[in-house]
Image (cartoon, helix red, strand yellow):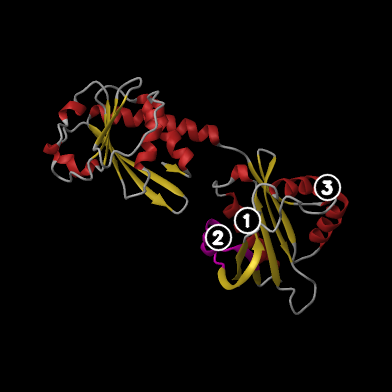
Amino acid sequence: MISHNETELIALGKQLGKLLEKQDVIILSGDLGAGKTTFTKGIAKGLGIDQMIKSPTYTIVREYEGRLPLYHLDVYRIGNDPDSIDLDDFLFGDGATIIEWGELIEPSLSDAYLKIFIRKLEDGRELSFEAHGARAEALLTSFEQVEKRMTKEKEVTVEIRQADSADAALVVDFLNQVGKESDYMSLDEAGIGMSPADMEQFLMVQEMAENRICLLLFLDQELAALLNITAVSQRSIQHIGDVFIVVQKAYWDQGLGQILLEEGIEWAHSTGVLRKLVLNVQVRNERAVHLYKKLGFEIEGCQARGACSAEGEFLDVYLMGKLID
């Protein structure tokens, strides 16, 4: 299973929590920062627990009351010395037991538990499973069925198409809106500074030029992201496309920027004219820098005080480029 962000990881945990029964045991395995406690927060929600869930790293165990008692253990500090706590009080109690770093004490557990591996990815978390015993196998089967339903419910229609002059008003409204959502862009609360008539003329030029394009990405017919590549007609520099990309804040961390930029790169290859793409990105925008590097852009320079935040702080800006061969 894949979760793309913390919200999705908690949602998965919540669904598992709804399925837990008395004396169910869950082992959570993963590196520091993998999301074990975050996943446990979701499990607690599924058990109807409203308390704040904290890592029991120093207390070893925390107990919470919900539909079932939740015993939340972190055995990292006791290592392979399970006798330092009375595990049986939890494993055979009236609640469900979650054990972070439980692989350290697996030899002391009866063969009746569900082991969940949480692995950090570049853009989320990957969950894999190992069921021990009939009850754990049944629990895993039920959880997988629920996850499939969740995935199906999240499915939306994605459409990417070239903007035309009829989209002018839509594009102006979109850019004016996203300009208010973040100061990571050259846009700000003042918006695009173009009327629909101005935008109509701009999009007509984009449509006709072989080295220009404006791409729109729609989710269920709602404009969610925009990519614009602009180049000039002068022979000496017509091969350089200037990239501008923006995603509506409501759709951040869903991979839309990568999808749209990949589409733009593919189009650039098809033109036969563009041989380089360039863009500017604030140094502090680490996620965007990471994405651009992932897709082959390289840092070619850094402009000191290339932007200014909403608070008046001067910001450095990377100049990045990608060769189109």
| Res 215 visible | yes
- Hey, which residue is sitting farthest bottom in the picture? 236
In this picture, is 168 found above or below 67?
Answer: below
| Residue 287 numbered tag | none
Q: Is residue 118 left or right of residue 200?
A: left
Q: Quadrant of the N terminus?
A: top left
Q: Residue at x 35, y 19 (%)?
A: 67
> Residue 27: horizontal and vertical position, in percent?
27, 38
Residue labelled with disc 3: 166
Can you identify the residue that label 1 sits on? 184
Q: Where does the image place residue 316, in percent across and percent down from the top left?
A: 60, 66
Q: In the image shown, does 52 or 318 lie closer to the viewer?
A: 52
Q: Is residue 60 above or below residue 291?
A: above
> What residue type is disc 3 on?
Ala
The Cα atoms of the two marked residues, 3 and 2, are separated by: 36 Å
**How far is mark 3 from mark 1, CA to CA?**
28 Å
Q: Position of residue 170 (x, y in %)?
A: 78, 45
Amino acid type for the residue under numbered disc 1:
Tyr
- The residue where tag 2 is placed is 284
The local secondary structure at tag 2 comes to loop
What kind of element bears circle 1? loop
Q: Is residue 324 visible?
A: no
Q: What range of the chain is rendered magenta?
A: 278-297
Near mark 3 (Cα within 10 A), the count class, few <14, some 14-19 or many ≥20, is: few
Measured as percent of width and height from the top left, residue 13 is found at 39, 34
x 62%, y 54%: residue: 260
- The residues tagged by marks 1 and 2 sit, at their Cα atoms, a distance apart of 8 Å
Q: Is residue 153 magenta?
A: no
